[in-house]
């Protein structure tokens, strides 16, 4: 099988999400370890 080269142009929602990550705005908090992340995920169980 040959490779297909597809140019993907992000839609406006994707562009906004990328911009938010770059600027660290409108993103959830960060975690310093997987354990910290899992503890936070399981805190409301």
Image: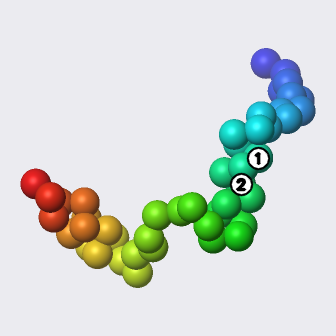
Q: Nearer the viewer, residue 26 or 42?
A: 26
Question: Can you say which quadrant of the picture contains the C terminus?
Answer: bottom left
**Number of other residues with Cα within 10 Å of mark 2, as a class: few under 14, some 14 to 19, many 20 or more:** few
Q: Is residue 11 left or right of residue 41?
A: right
Residue 30's disc number: none
Residue displayed at 65% across by 63% down: 21
Q: Is residue 30 left or right of residue 38?
A: right
Residue displayed at 63% across by 70% down: 24
Quadrant for residue 30, please give it. bottom left
Determine the secondary structure under disc 1.
Answer: helix
- Vertical relation: 35 (above or below) 5: below
From the top left corner, tell me how far across and down residue 7 is, in percent: 89, 33
Question: Can you say which quadrant of the picture contains the N terminus?
Answer: top right
Residue closest to the far bottom: 32
On the image, numbered disc 2 is attached to which residue? Answer: 18
Residue displayed at 76% across by 46% down: 15
Quadrant for residue 9, please give it. top right
- Vertical relation: 18 (above or below) 31: above
Asked if the residue at tag 2 contacts the one at tag 1, i.e. Cβ–Cβ closer than 8 Å, the answer is: yes
Residue 15's disc number: 1
Q: Nearer the viewer, residue 5 or 18?
A: 18
From the top left corner, tell me how far across and down residue 35 is, in percent: 26, 73
């Amino acid at each position: 099988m040959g490779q297909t080269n597809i140019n993907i142009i992000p839609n406006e929602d994707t562009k906004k999400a990328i911009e938010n990550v770059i600027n660290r705005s409108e993103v959830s908090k960060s975690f310093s370890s997987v354990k910290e992340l899992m503890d936070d995920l399981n805190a409301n169980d």
